[in-house]
Amino acid sequence: MPWQPTKLSWTTTQPRYVDDQTLISADVARKAINQVYALVRDLLAERMPLEAAEALADKLTTGTWTHDYPITAREAKCLGLPVRTDMPAEIYQFMEFLPQQTRTLPSVEYVPHPERHGHGKRA
């Protein structure tokens, strides 16, 4: 049986009170979470036992953090990831040839949706 994330709140709402677009978006979101989970689990399983990989993949893909939260090396080690911080000086020298763009905009932006009136109907 494929992995299923913790039951999402929309699944407990009666569908007659939720418009079609919301149900479609929730279904797409569930599929995306399942796809990311499977990929992360498979990548982790190459370096740790499957049971540990499944538990860590669940933690990494089911909303513990926002998508832009930076997991530090210390946190990654605590999670059981094989992290090293002893970077050779040559790598730093090489990276100087690959400058990164400085972000001037927030990484998460709010985009309002059209107002909805009534149950399941757009204005």
Image: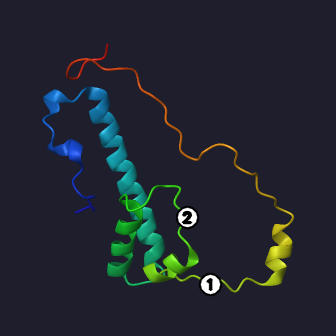
Location of the N terminus (image quadrant) = bottom left
The answer to which image quadrant residue 4 occupies is: bottom left
Query: Farthest residue toward the top?
Result: 123
Q: Which mark is residue 11?
A: none
From the viewer's side, name the closer residue of 61 and 103. 103
Foreground mark, 2 or 1, reads 2
Location of the C terminus (image quadrant) = top left
Amino acid type for the residue under numbered disc 2:
Pro
Left or right: 19, with 56 as reference point:
left
Q: Earlier in the sequence, mark 2 or mark 1?
A: 2
Q: Which mark is residue 70?
A: 2
Cα distance in 3D space between marks 2 and 1: 16 Å
Left or right: 24, with 87 as reference point:
left
Q: Secondary structure at mark 2?
A: loop
* Residue 33 percent coordinates (x, y): 37, 54
* Residue 86 percent coordinates (x, y): 69, 86
Identity of the residue drawn at 81% across and 68% down: 95
What is the image's colouring?
Answer: rainbow
Q: Secondary structure at mark 1?
A: loop
- Above or below: residue 19 compared with residue 44: above
- Above or below: residue 123 compared with residue 62: above
Identity of the residue drawn at 50% across and 82% down: 77
Amino acid type for the residue under numbered disc 1:
Arg
* Callouts 2 and 1 close, C-beta under 8 Å: no
Q: Which residue is mark 1?
A: 84
